Each structure stands twice: as C-alpha cells, then as structure tokens.
Amino acid sequence: MSLIINRKLVKNFYKAELFYKLHKAKECIKLFEAKYGKSFKEFERDVKTNSENFEAWDDYMEWKSCIKELETVNKLLNVISNLNCLNLNFSILYIFALYFQ
C-alpha cells in the first residue's frame, strides 16, 4: 500500500488554517480596541506607566500576543502563497505542522 499526498490540497489545507488563525487574531485585536477605545501603542504606554492595574496588565499581555500571532500568520501566509506546489517539500510541511500543533 502506498501513500499519495496531493501537494495542492495540503497547501490549501494550511492556507485555510492560516486564514482561520488570521481571523481569530484580528478579532482579538478588535475586542481590545473596543474595550479600551485606543490603539495598542496608546494602551501599552498607559499600562507601562500604571503597573498597579492587574486586569489591564493581563489584557496587555494577551493583546500583545494577538498582535504577534497576526504578524506570524501574515508571514506564513506570504510564504505559503508564494510556494509553487511542485516545490512544496516535506521540510516546509514539517514547519507548518509544528506551527499548527
């Protein structure tokens, strides 16, 4: 018995997963922007000057994480979108598989 992997389907699977993560990160950022009525940079400045507000500090860490996730997903989407399916090798698939764990 042999295993046949359709590279285009694998690429499309990872793209779909990345679009889901992209949407999730954007929604997270919108939630915090609506909650605090300001951008992350403004919020970061306020939190760092008033470290006694633990809820705000927790939100700061989560918001920052959402921004990092958005940046990572955008980079991965750029990589996978520019991949030719013929060049889609298992080392690249392994990197994506690790990301999605």
Image: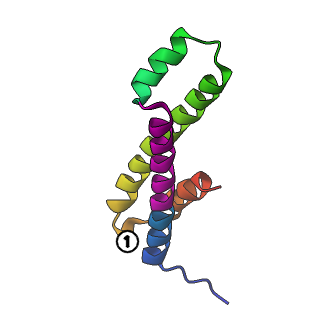
Amino acid type shown at disc 1: Leu
Which residue in the structure is indicated by mark 1?
Answer: 86
Q: Give the percent coordinates (x, y) of residue 63.
A: 53, 35
- Residue 67 in view, yes or no: no
Vertical side of 12 occupied by 98: above or below: above
Locate residue 4, reporting x and y percent: 56, 83
Residue 75 drawn above or below residue 16: above
Q: Which residues are magenta?
A: 18-37
Quarter of image, res 57: top right
Is residue 3 visible in this depiction of the protein? yes
Query: Which quadrant does the N terminus fall into?
Result: bottom right
Image location of residue 14, percent across then percent down = 49, 65
Whether residue 32 appears in magenta in the rendering, the answer is yes
Main SS of the magenta segment? Answer: helix
Question: What's the residue at 47%, 67% (across, down)?
Answer: 16
Of 50 and 68, the residue lying toward us = 50
- For the point 48% across and 16% down, the residue is 46
